[in-house]
Image (cartoon, helix red, strand yellow):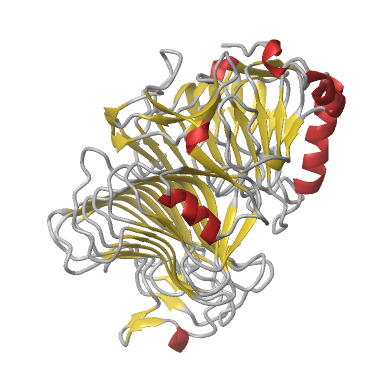
Amino acid sequence: MHCSPGIFTGRIALATALGFFSMATGSGLAASGAQPNFGPNVLVFTPTMSQAAMQQQIDKVYAIQRRNEFGPQRNALLFLPGKYKVDVPIGFYTEVMGLGASPDDVLIDGNFHSNASEDNNNATTTFWRAAEGIAVTPPAGSMRWAVSQAAPFRRMHVRGNIVLHQFNGWASGGWMSDDWIDGTVDAGPQQQWISRNTEWGQWTGSNWNMVFVGVPNPPAGEWPSPPYTKIALTPIVREKPFLQVDAAGNYSVRVPSLRRNSSGITWHGGSTPGRSIPLDHFYIARPGIDTAGSINAQLEKGKDLLLTPGIYDLMDAIHITRHDTVVLGMGFATVRPINGTPAMTTTDADGIVIAGLLFDAGPLQSPVLLEVGPDGSKARHTKNPISLHDVFFRVGGAGVGRTLVNLKINSNDTILDHTWIWRADHGSGVGWELNTSNNGLVVNGNNVTVYGLFVEHHQQFQVLWNGNGGRTYFYQSEIPYDPPNQPSYRSAPDTKGWASYKVADSVTHHQAWGLGIYSVFEQPGVELTRAIEVPKRPDVKFHHMITVALGNHGAILNVINKTGGSTSMHPRVTPKVTTYP
């Protein structure tokens, strides 16, 4: 699908001169047939623009975002259908999107890459960047995607190979889904990774915890050597919604259909099955202009919500109250409660979708940042579940932040499709008494399914699972670095620390696959009794677990309950458990 240059009559001369479309004027409501107003932080490229002008604008964004780990800038780079010959480096808080129905509608013939954000090829803090909906022909046959957490790679077609590290430097985990890699995926030293519904020629590399769900051609070998966890079919998922433009220049948001027991990508037939919502059904919110009040007023009118890149300081929560509402963020749009409220809540209704947002805790303690369904939610949503995609959470790092819980899921049957829930271990406003957070994820709903669960450094249970029938596919967690001493870090008189992954004693059915839990205690004499704590019941089943002590202090004494043994041996060991019980 190619967009006709005639669609943009009257704009091409200006766009060619500037190298982009900056949608900075007009109403926040998209008018039918009009060019959407995405604001100044969104660049929309067309294949008719000059290569030099496009490259200049791409490079300007990267110059700011290359090392901008805790900066306020947010950007989205959008490519209309067509062919481009540009170099696209992707820095912090940058989302690069193709606007075709299929990734093959947008072809970048050139270097498309994420480089390590630290020196010495260190990608362990290469966070908060995204790529989706683009076909890439790498000039040397291989593209680099050296990333760690919160760096989704979705609906991409790599016409060659992809390398998930920079010259064998450190990297700490990542995500890919609905991708097609013609050649080889080289994981190299990546510590952990999840691939869901992705196809490739071959996969090479392993380290601690590599999980493959719904992947038709997973690598050979079985846990624990190599540490591969393979689940043939993805039990239930819908892909993340995405922005698209048709041949007549009409914008819409595609909401992919729910799939059950699936393998491989959605777009072999060209487009992804699903429904399209015209963009004029969305309220297009803008940072610095829109408030929780203005956004809620539009949601109450029945609008869906598109949050353009930037930081939204909220005096009240955004309330999602209608079934099938779609909330979509662009360019790591960031919502930050500054008055001690939640950032966002939803009703207990079918089909709500929330995607592409960064929830940043404010200086006054919030009870929760995102709450899905109110406490006591009872409805079932088996036919049309609520789903969350690429929702990320941060407590501290950019400044002091406080919350009790980051993400609380009360609604049954919810799908969580990639999250990183991070209490900062570095940056500004960081300390045991400063960036306070009890739990990353609390699940109260039944039959909740999670893919790609990254949760780190919270002060009590990283994950507390109270609902029945839960399933987790891939878990990565560092427990907190900064407990000042053991008395400050006990969940019970006879228990050191708080288990990273806790299944409540009342739960009778739960399963999890591929879990890696790590310690980096800063103070001597601090230990964790067990990384995973679960009731010992036949239908509470855990598969493929590892613990690692990354620092010289302390230890994790057991992997799960009283099983697995300690990391405290010298030299350090990495205990592994294949199944429990």
Quadrant of the image containing the C terminus: bottom left
Q: Is residue 159 visible?
A: no
- Quarter of the figure with residue 494: bottom left
Q: Is residue 81 left or right of residue 268?
A: right
Above or below, 551 against 16 in this view is below
Tell me what residue is drawn at x 63 percent, y 73 percent.
Answer: 400
Tell me what residue is drawn at x 34 percent, y 30 percent.
Answer: 214
Quadrant of the image containing the N terminus: top right
* Residue 193, horizontal then vertical, whole percent: 48, 42
- Quarter of the figure with residue 315: bottom right
* Residue 526, horizontal then vertical, whole percent: 48, 80
Above or below, 189 against 556 in this view is above
Above or below, 340 against 100 in this view is below
Q: Is residue 220 left or right of residue 117?
A: left
* Residue 114, horizontal then vertical, whole percent: 68, 38
Question: In the depicted view, which residue is nearer to us: 576 or 35?
Answer: 35
Total marks shown come to 0
Above or below, 472 against 141 in this view is below
Question: In the depicted view, which residue is nearer to us: 288 or 465?
Answer: 288
Q: Is residue 118 visible?
A: yes
Tell me what residue is drawn at x 69 percent, y 33 percent.
Answer: 113
Q: Is residue 102 left or right of residue 405?
A: right
- Quarter of the figure with residue 9: top right
* Residue 550, horizontal then vertical, whole percent: 55, 62
Tell me what residue is drawn at x 85 percent, y 25 percent.
Answer: 53
Question: In the depicted view, which residue is nearer to us: 177 or 572?
Answer: 177
Question: In the depicted view, which residue is nearer to us: 373 or 23?
Answer: 23
